[in-house]
Image (spheres, rainbow, N blue to C red):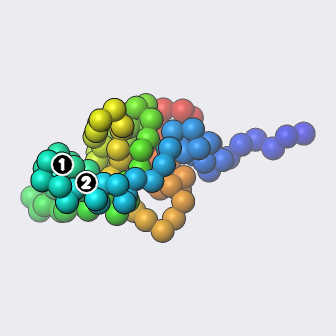
Amino acid sequence: MLAEATTQDNCRQLVDNHVYCNVSYLVDELRRDEKYMDELLEVQVQFVHQDDGEEVINEALEHWVVSAYLGERLKEEGEMVMDFYNLTIWGRTTSGQAISIDSVIEDIYNKNLA
């Protein structure tokens, strides 16, 4: 009897199918060029207005090329995502853990695929 896949297994599969490669170095190099500086700001820093009127600044710690599908789902969750020369780039605000255990990935799985 096969064990039923867990949410974590399904999130790992979502990442395996829709997160393509890390482009942090590329984004870092391109943002130094005046030609791309302003355009790439969209996946560098995000200003979030909280209910109490305070403004929080989220900074991307990593950049990943993702599928258009995942990019749209990430945008729906308020993540930093942009289309840049036919690449969908996600500015990830966490680092040091597997993408599949990011809460945003689990939220996307639960809302769209569970």
Q: What element does badge 1 sit on? A: helix
**Residue farthest right in this picture:** 1
Residue toward you, 111 or 66: 66
> At 43% from the left edge and 65% from the top edge, which residue is drawn?
95
Can residue 53 be seen here? yes
Number of numbered discs visible in the structure rendering: 2
> At 37% from the left edge and 58% from the top edge, which residue is drawn?
24
| Relative horizontal placement of residue 52, taking residue 40 as reference (left or right) | left
Q: Earlier in the sequence, mark 2 or mark 1?
A: 2
For the residue carrying disc 1, how many other residues have a C-alpha within 10 Å: few (<14), some (14-19), or many (20+)?
some
| Relative horizontal placement of residue 36, taking residue 90 as reference (left or right) | left
Q: Is residue 69 above or below residue 91?
A: above
Q: Position of residue 100 (x, y in %)?
A: 54, 52
- Mark number for residue 36? 1
Q: Which residue is mark 2?
A: 30
Amino acid type of disc 2? Leu
Q: Quadrant of residue 50?
A: bottom left
